[in-house]
């Protein structure tokens, strides 16, 4: 199983000092600020560390987000706004907008931006494993698991945290619904690719493989349609990948459907199915 997955770049961010002179007046408060700065820097390093694995990433994520929650969650346990939420300014770039940063003085903006990068890291980790020539069963499971984790993070951000932002996500930016939905669907589609690869290796029924391939092609088509209202300069490369995968798995679906038909002595229908598979490959010319 050797897969190629398209990946948008990680979001970049400006350093944050967490120096609150006159606000953090006690030794314990200063320690929390120092720990925030240290854990944020460590988490950012993990994104580009090739030795990082899901366990290390989870530990680094938990360490930073548990402290960041002190700026978001009300200290008295009520639904009232935490006054510390708007004390620090955060800057982040977007995966589709090059080096143009967005800035918000809001700890929730930091939460969703950093968590977005965590989700992207899981997709990149999955891509790195899936791109190997000889992927073991355990590694295939890690690919599948990582993509499910990424999809879960994207979904939680979209449904729970992004709606809390004081400044709504701008059109064409990472945090707006079209981009978030596309990331979620793409993770689902790529996770299913792993299932198809295992089914082929284990020589499962051709009808099952054809059905999985058809569903996967539809996932990619849905993801592509979700992006079709974004500006081409932002989404062109991404959409080409989605279109390529859609045609690829539609060809798979027709090929394995042809095998099913041939096994049932429906030779004419099998030939027509294989001809449809050939048409799907024209995009590769």
Image: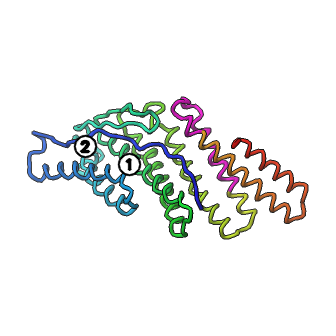
Q: Is residue 20 left or right of residue 231?
A: left
Query: What residue lies at 18% left-to-right and 48% top-to-bottom?
Result: 33
Whichever of labels 1 and 2 marks the residue nearer the N terminus, that label is 2
Q: Which secondary structure, mark 2?
A: loop
- Where is residue 68 drawn, in percent x and y? 27, 49
Q: In the rendering, which numbered label is found on residue 257?
A: none
Q: Could you tell me if residue 77 is visible in this image? A: no
The residue wearing badge 2 is: 82
Q: Quadrant of the rendered structure where residue 94 is?
A: top left
Instruction: Look at the magenta stretch and give its main secondary structure.
Output: helix
Picture disc at residue 115 = 1
Q: Nearer the viewer, residue 105 or 165?
A: 105
Q: Is residue 183 left or right of residue 281?
A: left
Residue at figure coordinates x 87%, y 65% from the top left? 264
Disc 1 secondary structure class: helix
Measuring 59% from the left and 43% from the top, which residue is drawn there? 241
Foreground pick, 160 / 39:
39
Residue under the image location 31 percent in, 34 percent down: 104
Position of residue 268 measured from the top left corner of the image (x, y, whole percent): 91, 55
Q: Is residue 142 magenta?
A: no
Q: Which residues are magenta?
A: 213-239
Mark 1 or 2, closer to the camera: 1
The question of residue 214 being in magenta is answered with yes
- Residue 284 position, x and y percent, is 69, 43
Q: Quadrant of the N terminus?
A: bottom right
Measure the C-alpha gap from mark 1 to mark 2: 20 Å
Screen quadrant of the C terminus:
top right
Q: Where does residue 28 sit, x and y in percent of width and height?
A: 12, 53
Dot 1 crowding, Cα within 10 Å, few <14, some 14–19, many 20+: some
């Amino acid at each position: 199983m050797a897969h190629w997955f398209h990946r948008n770049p990680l979001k970049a961010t400006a350093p944050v000092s967490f120096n609150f002179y006159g606000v953090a007046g006690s030794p314990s408060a200063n320690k929390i600020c120092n720990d925030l700065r240290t854990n944020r820097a460590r988490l950012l390093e993990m994104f580009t560390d090739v030795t990082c694995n899901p366990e290390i990433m989870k530990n680094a994520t938990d360490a930073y987000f548990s402290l960041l929650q002190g700026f978001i969650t009300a200290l008295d346990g009520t639904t009232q706004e935490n006054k510390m939420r708007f004390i620090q300014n955060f800057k982040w770039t977007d995966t589709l907008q090059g080096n143009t940063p967005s800035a918000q003085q809001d700890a929730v903006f930091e939460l969703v931006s950093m968590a977005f990068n965590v989700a992207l890291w899981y997709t990149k980790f999955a891509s790195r494993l899936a791109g190997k020539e000889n992927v073991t069963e355990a590694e295939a499971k890690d690919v599948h698991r990582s993509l499910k984790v990424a999809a879960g993070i994207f979904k939680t951000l979209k449904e729970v945290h992004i709606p809390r932002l004081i400044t709504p996500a701008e059109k064409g930016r990472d945090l707006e619904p079209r981009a978030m939905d596309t990331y979620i669907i793409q993770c689902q589609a790529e996770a299913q690719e792993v299932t198809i690869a295992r089914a082929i290796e284990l020589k499962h029924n051709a009808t099952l493989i054809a059905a999985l391939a058809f569903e996967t092609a539809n996932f990619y088509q849905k993801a592509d349609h979700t992006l079709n209202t974004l500006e081409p300069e932002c989404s062109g490369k991404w959409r080409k990948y989605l279109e390529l995968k859609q045609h690829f798995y539609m060809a798979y679906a027709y090929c394995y459907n042809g095998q099913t038909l041939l096994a049932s002595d429906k030779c004419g229908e099998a030939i027509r199915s294989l001809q449809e598979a050939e048409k799907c490959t024209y995009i590769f010319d």
